[in-house]
Image: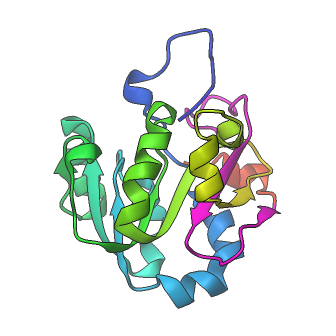
Amino acid sequence: MSSTNRGSKRRKDDFYETPAWCVDRLMERIQPAWVYHVHNAVALEPCAGRGSIIQAMDKYSLEWSPNELRLGLAGECERLTGHRTRVGKFQTWDPPYADLVMTNPPFSLAQEVLEWSLPRAKVVILLLRLNFLGSAKRCRLLQEHAPSVFVLPNRPSFTGKGTDSIEYAWFVWGLYSTPTVDVLDPTPRSVRLRK
């Protein structure tokens, strides 16, 4: 879900892997609430890609059920994470109710992913463009399901070729009784450049 090179050709299927440091900054901030709600829990990843979020979350002992939209990437996800990966549209996937949904969805499918996720898990965490908040189309949904928003102060590089052109945040539903906006700690450049 990148806005890099908006005027040029986007990556096929809006596939942009999540850098591990983005996950690390969020987990540093939400740790106490996280442990209470979803540590050692069942987690769904509806747009798993190669499994970068699953790999970054490895230390939390979650039982993942990943889904990937593309056959080729699903095989890579399974190989890299060791979790059997369903292949197909998340919209046709009806897994048992889970403790967590966590994903970086293609921005073109972000609202659909959110609407799919909310009734399927206790906690939903999506990495989205910060401007996801500013849309008449999503207005009613976000009023009815207001998220806590954790802003990344450093722009991620989803391609490995420079940072993106827009701000990003983790949107969290179900972890806090009152929605909040918070700015996460900066990440040193040396960490952001690691693969």
Tell me the residue at 57%/81% (across/down). 34
Q: Report the residue at 37% width, 27% height from top.
A: 13
Q: Is residue 64 above or below residue 187?
A: below
Q: Is residue 184 visible?
A: no
Q: Position of residue 173 (x, y in %)?
A: 57, 65
User: In this view of the protein, which residue sits in the foreground, 95 or 18?
Assistant: 95
Specify the quadrant of the image occupied by residue 118: bottom left
Question: Residue 188: x, y in percent?
Answer: 79, 55
Note whether residue 60 is visible.
yes
Q: Dividing the picture into quarters, in which one does residue 181 lie?
A: bottom right
- Residue 190 falls left or right of residue 127: right
Residue 141: percent from the left, percent from the top?
56, 49
Provide the residue span drawn in magenta: 157-185
Looking at the picture, tell me which residue is in the foreground, 136 or 161: 136
Colouring of the image: rainbow
**Residue at the extreme bottom of the image, as rendered:** 36
Residue 135 is one of the magenta-drawn residues: no
Q: Is residue 166 magenta?
A: yes
Residue 172 shown left or right of residue 97 in the figure: right
Q: Is residue 66 above or below residue 108?
A: below
- For the point 46% across and 60% down, the residue is 102
Residue shown at the point (30%, 62%) measured from the top left: 81
Count of numbered marks? 0
Q: Is residue 34 left or right of residue 97?
A: right
- Majority secondary structure in the magenta region: loop
